[in-house]
Amino acid sequence: MTDLIIPTDQGLYCPAGDFHIDPWRPVPRAVITHGHADHARSGCGRYWGAAPGLGLMRERIGYGAGIVPLAYGQRVAFGPTTVSLHPAGHVLGSAQVRVEHQGEIWVCSGDYKRDPDPTCEPFEVVPCDVFITEATFGLPVYRWQPTEEVAQEIFDWWQQCKTDGVTAILHCYALGKAQRILAELARLTDETVYLHGAMTRLVKLYRDAGIRMLPTDAVGNQPKFFDWKGKLLLAPPGAGGTPWMRRFKPFSAAFASGWMRVRGTRRREAYDRGFTLSDHADWPSLLRTIEETGARRVLATHGNTDALVAWCRERGIEARELKTEYEGEPTKADRDTAETIADSGIDSNSDPA
């Protein structure tokens, strides 16, 4: 039997339904899992995506793009195939793509996580025959601690910065991670957090979707001689080491990412603190998810695929790597060298996600 979803030069393609999933080049019909730049690209003829992420998709792809919002679980026909979107728990509006054809079910996970997150719908296990799973953190070393513990660590560091009379600058990805941090900290305080210009529009989109977060203000809205000591700032990783940082001296710089789980990463990237917080599944969650889907075949994409493929094969599950151009959550060395977006409010679509 021919595979229901295959890799092509344009991206993952369903020949039976004549559509692509998260294509990396323009195609006539694109089903999008979420709004990160490596999954949602402009130039396609028409898009389908989960309704909760419509605002983010418009921001990323363009407000004039033809986007069809689908409710989670809503079924639509693409030729003889039936397609539905299901929560992935990655960021606001993130979705898995379920494709059914002639009694066979494939699920493309997109990026996902199993940990609780107040900013998006929780992951839904979708039983399937073939599961296309991400493997960004597909090694046994990657195991996340409870999110509430990480939020408390971030809060305690912020309070220590107040005591020390320094600015607390927390680097994190502008879409998903920043909003999750603001939502988690809202359980502990109601103090205002200040945002790099790359984050303001994306945070507003989350507020517009009804997500409760700490109050925020843009760094660029503050007067020239504003006292930053003891304040918490969120900034994208690309802002580190740039002239933008000078106004906040003295400061303590931290990074919130799953990569902080690896000993030595924080030192190599010159952060004072590292907080292990990821919007991707850790190793135990990847294994649990594969088992719960009941998939007899697994295709692992972007990340540490070798260990995950080996684990599947040891358990009698047919598995192999599936090459894609998705980046996952990159390290600082691997990230695109994106310009630091000024506080004047340049379109945040150019910011690394």
Image (cartoon, rainbow, N blue to C red):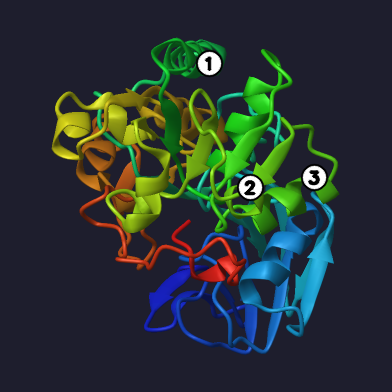
Which numbered marker is on residue 207?
Answer: 3
The residue that label 1 is drawn on is 155
The residue that label 2 is drawn on is 222
Callout 2: helix, strand or loop?
A: loop
Indicate whether 36 appears above or below 143.
below
- Mark 1 neighbour density, 10 Å: few (under 14) some (14–19) many (20 or more): some
Taking 311 as reference, is 225 left or right?
Answer: right
x, y (%) of residue 52?
79, 52
Q: Identify residue type, mark 3.
A: Arg
Q: Identify residue type, mark 1.
A: Phe
Residue 113 in sight from this viewpoint: no
x, y (%) of residue 208?
84, 50
x, y (%) of residue 181?
58, 31
**In the image, what residue occupies the spot 33% across and 37% down?**
137
- Image quadrant in which you'd find residue 56: bottom right
Closer to us: 50 or 182: 182
- Sequence-wise, the earlier of marks 1 and 2 is 1
Residue 193 in sight from this viewpoint: yes
